Image (tube, rainbow, N blue to C red):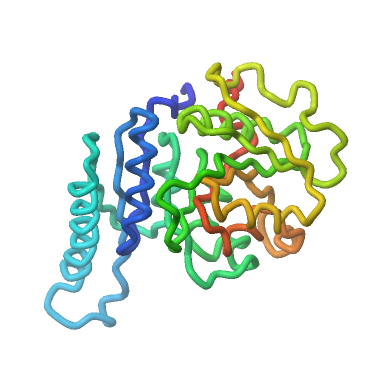
């Protein structure tokens, strides 16, 4: 069976609670991509003895339906004219959205407040679960208020590894779609502003200004500072699972809890031709 073509897939938004900023980011992204939107809310019924009333499942489903109804209000007031599908699924949000990601261009979720890097790394919250498992990029939208027109462009955290071609490709695409520059933060130890062949040969043809910056400070501190005025921070997906790997503390893990702009966590193979 051929792999799904995610470039014609939807933008999937995981609707968990009243977070209009998450829905609005998904709508804006769909408008940039010319893609449909799937607003997905997953709910899991608890054990029956924890409920009161004649039909606990209907009670939970009604509450879940109300969550989607509030998301619909955000869509109606956004001014976007997009094809939006509202999807209510009974099941745990993590596995549900991982399945949605199989055919999506991107999955958008909200950041979990108060989640530490270790809990995130072992998949202890929704964004961490998706970032480690989703087949497409995952964008995590912070709860903090953002400037109406951030002027810092798209920022890519690069460690100089050749396997960051996927995140670089995604960063170039996003900068082109937004009409912004791509600022590449090179980790300490790199000796060239842009390594030969670093830009994938199949990268978008749109003219994008690439502005490399060599870091003289800690990479995580530089990324966090950049999120104050960036429209998007692009980071490489962490590799590995469990406590032992979590203790290596990848950049994505350390940046997410305090990021002030949306953070895209991108697989290394994003946009590459599928293997035959």
Residue extending furthest toward the left: 54
Q: Position of residue 41 (x, y in %)?
A: 30, 55
- Identified at 56% across, 44% down, the residue is 152
Nearer to us in this view, 263 or 226: 226
Q: Quadrant of residue 163?
A: top right
Q: Quadrant of residue 107?
A: top left
Nearer to us in this view, 170 or 42: 170
- Identified at 50% across, 56% down, the residue is 127
| Drawn side of residue 241 relative to residue 104, left or right | right
**Would residue 264 be visible to someone looking at this image?**
no
> In this picture, is 208 found above or below 19?
above
**Which quarter of the image is occupied by the C terminus?**
top right
Q: Position of residue 82 (x, y in %)?
A: 24, 35
| Drawn side of residue 92 relative to residue 216, left or right | left
Q: Count all numbered tags in the image, as a single digit.
A: 0
Q: Quadrant of residue 60?
A: bottom left
Q: Position of residue 271 (x, y in %)?
A: 56, 27
**Would residue 33 be visible to someone looking at this image?**
yes
Nearer to us in this view, 72 or 231: 231
Q: Position of residue 135 (x, y in %)?
A: 52, 39
- Identified at 66% across, 22% down, the residue is 200
- Identified at 48% across, 25% down, the residue is 3
> In this picture, is 89 found above or below 200?
below
């Amino acid at each position: 069976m051929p792999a799904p073509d995610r470039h014609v897939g939807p933008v999937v938004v995981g609707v968990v609670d009243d977070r209009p900023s998450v829905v609005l980011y998904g709508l804006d992204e769909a408008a940039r991509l010319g893609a449909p939107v799937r607003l997905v809310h997953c709910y899991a019924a608890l054990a029956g003895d924890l409920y009161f009333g004649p039909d606990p499942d209907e009670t939970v489903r009604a509450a879940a339906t109300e969550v989607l109804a509030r998301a619909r209000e955000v869509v109606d007031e956004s001014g976007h004219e997009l094809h939006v599908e509202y999807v209510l699924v009974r099941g745990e949000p993590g596995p549900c959205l991982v399945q949605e990601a199989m055919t999506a261009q991107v999955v958008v979720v909200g950041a979990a407040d108060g989640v530490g890097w270790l809990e995130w790394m072992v998949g202890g919250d929704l964004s961490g679960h998706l970032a480690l498992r989703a087949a497409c990029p995952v964008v995590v939208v912070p709860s903090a208020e953002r400037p109406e027109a951030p002027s810092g462009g798209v920022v890519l955290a690069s460690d100089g590894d050749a396997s960051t071609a996927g995140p670089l490709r995604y960063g170039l695409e996003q900068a082109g779609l937004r009409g912004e520059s791509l600022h590449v933060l090179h980790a300490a130890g790199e000796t060239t502003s842009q390594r030969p062949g670093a830009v994938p040969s199949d990268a978008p043809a749109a003219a994008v200004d690439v502005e490399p910056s060599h870091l003289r400070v800690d990479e995580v501190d530089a990324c966090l500072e950049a999120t104050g005025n960036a429209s998007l921070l692009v980071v490489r997906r962490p590799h590995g699972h469990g406590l032992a790997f979590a203790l290596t503390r990848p950049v994505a893990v350390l940046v997410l809890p305090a990021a002030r702009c949306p953070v895209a966590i991108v697989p290394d193979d994003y946009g590459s031709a599928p293997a035959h």
